[in-house]
Amino acid sequence: MTTDLSLLTTAAAKWEAAAKDFETVQGTYDSQVRNVAVDGSWTGTAATTFRETTKTQTYNQYTAAAAEARAVASLLRDAHGQFTELRKKLENEVKRAEEAGMKVSENGSATFDFAKADKALADAARHDPDLHTTEATWSARIATAVQAVDDADQGVKLALQAAVQDTDLFDGFANGFNAKAEGDIEKVEAKKAAELALELDSKGHLDEKKLAELERLFRDNSGNKEFSRTLLDNVGADGAIKLSNKLDGLTSSDKSHKQDYLALQGGLATSVSTATADAKTPFYEKWREELRKAGEKNFGSKTNPLYGYQSFVSLMGHHDQYGKAFLNDLGNDIIATEKQHDGIWNRIAGGHKGIGNDPLDGLLGIMGKQPDAATAFFDPGADGKNEHLKYLLKDRHWPKWTTVGPAGIHDLDDPASRMGFGSAFEAAATGKVPGTHHALGGHSEAEARVMHDTIRVLNSDWKGDKLPQNLRSPLGHMLTDYTSDTHEILSRTNEHYKKFNEEGGVWKDGGTVRMAVHKDDLVKIMRGVADDPAAFAAMYNAERQYAADTLVQVPFKGDPDNRAAAIEAASSVYGFYDGISSDVVFDKRDQAIQWARDVSHAATATSGALLNFVPAEIGNGIATPKGVKVGADLTNRLFDFAAYEWTKEQISEAGAAAGKETRAAFNTGQRQVDNLVLEWGRKNGYESNDGLVRHLVGSGQERHDSARNEAFIALDREK
């Protein structure tokens, strides 16, 4: 902490001066020594030998000496920069710990400083059961900062040692100067890492010292572009894949070093991410071309193949952020490979533990953590030229599991098929990482195009309850995120949505992006989602909250037409939901009650969480007046609307309908609307027996019934 780091730059200046001195002496040697051998004044055997070898070798040593000196100077300046930055980070960690009430010892241990704390704080600390955990956390943070300094110190040592080693075996000197001395610490470390990585792959193991050094090299250079590109340049795509395969095997076979091998996989994956972050570099194109060749290469056996892309995408799973261009390019390259080699990813025999057989689906799973990359990959574009969605939803031959037994060869669907895809296209349409809590709505035009085309393409191929199982939940989440749009589509009162459905389906309404599809297409996809009870319940709960918000935004005693429009819109939407529920129950028969229970359980489990919607101004042609905002931060929300026991009604109607030969007509949705109207009235001082409230209850029944029947008609078209 007290070392005078300026001595490093002082030493660097002296090494630079030494380089100039070597060049000056080289000039003197050239003019006063070498020239004697060529001016004819010196003859004989000694002169001949000198002319043929010594004069050139000695002259080159001056060149090498100058190169070595400059490399050392560069390394010292690099070291000064690193140590200055790392010491500052260490000092900041110590300062933060002290500000948090800690006392930091000379060895970096953090303990609560009772001497400096006032009595109340000290007493609280003594009785705090988490005090030791807090102290350990600060100690660990300081230890990490210290470790970074030590890692850098080891890197400088390695680079300086490498700089002064004569690497040319044919320069005529056993211990001459290093003409190829490297002045970049990270490049030296990368070459060492590549050397150790290739040794690990060829020998199958490293001794403890070398294993620790390889870990240090990755740890010390995490996120460094020069290190990452130099490393990958030296090992190549083939070498990276072989190393990944080796590490996969070692994590299973060498349990005592499992964490070490996992750390190496993480370091290698981080290097791939860092090296490929900028697509506009010569390295990027070279690496991508190498990866194309290695990606379709079989690194396994004929009977149990293991292709490069399978291993590479598995390796990528050890890091969580990659360049958008790299993800897009890699996806395109994998698609090109599988189109050229149909069935290449089919799983044969036992497969390979820890490595997914479908690299495209694995890559899409990684994209699911980067919504911007997923959106870029799936967005059809304003011109509709990007067909990734169409390919994955309709055209792709998804990999199979091939089994060989006494009964012959059988191809089975992979149970994990489309899981990565579902994650990616949910992220692409919503702009959010799946599973994260966020306000619903508020999409970009690209995200809305993904949602629009998903519904359009699915309706050209998959029909209702034929949706692939692993797409139901993601689609449900997507539709939940688009509740503000699906509400308007199913309300059947918004002329803008009808118009724009026929004119591209995505448009900007002021600052809000909207998405429209035909109501029949939407109903079919909702029907497919409904086979996943939890996904259907999430959609239903979002609609309940949104419908409640649209009602409360209309003045209860205001324009009767606006009030009626809001009620009729909600009734229409719930009519479609009831039609879908009826269709599911009709299809499932024996499992109908269980389905309703599962939906009800999921709805009850999540109904306590108040949903918010990104505020959006509602335009002409829908339930609420122009200028009204429906969305988050409403001060008069119908918090108690969930009191209506919809779940019990749902189960009861399912039981009544299960044994019938025709689809029973669910009415729970309209009773939901009536309950909302009652709560709406109470918020405005009207009880349920007041004339206005009694008039409004049931006023949307006709709209509900017609919507439910339209749902039946839409679903009948596909049966």
Image (cartoon, grey):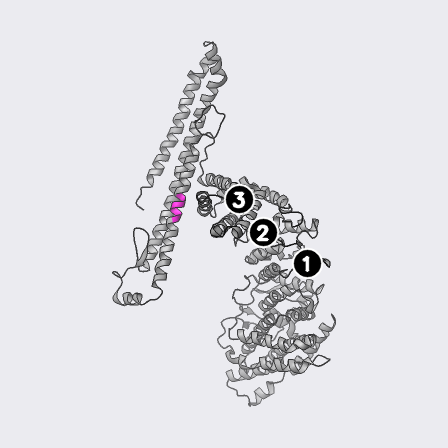
Q: In the image, is residue 548 above or below residue 462?
A: below
Left or right of 20 in this view: 527: right
| Residue found at x 52% / y 51% | 251
Q: Is residue 569 visible?
A: no
Q: Nearer the viewer, residue 385 or 234?
A: 234
Kind of residue at badge 1? Lys
What SS does tag 1 mark?
helix
Task: State which tag comes first along the sequence, 1 or 3.
Answer: 3
Question: Is residue 13 covered in magenta?
Answer: no
Q: To which residue does mark 3 refer?
A: 204
- Position in image of residue 107 (x %, y %): 31, 51
Q: Dot 3, how many residues are within 10 Å of its Cα: few (below 14), some (14-19), or many (20+)?
A: few
Q: In front of the other: label 1 or label 3?
A: 3
Q: To which residue does mark 2 refer?
A: 313
Q: Nearer the viewer, residue 37 or 510?
A: 37
Q: In front of the other: label 2 or label 1?
A: 2
**Region of the chain picked out in magenta, as a range:** 147-152
What SS does tag 3 mark?
loop
| Residue found at x 45% / y 48% | 219
Q: To which residue does mark 1 refer?
A: 390
What SS does tag 2 mark?
helix
Q: Dot 2, how many residues are within 10 Å of its Cα: few (below 14), some (14-19), or many (20+)?
A: many
Q: Quadrant of residue 480?
A: bottom right
Task: State which tag comes first along the sequence, 2 or 3.
Answer: 3
| Residue found at x 52% / y 43% | 200
Question: Is residue 151 covered in magenta?
Answer: yes
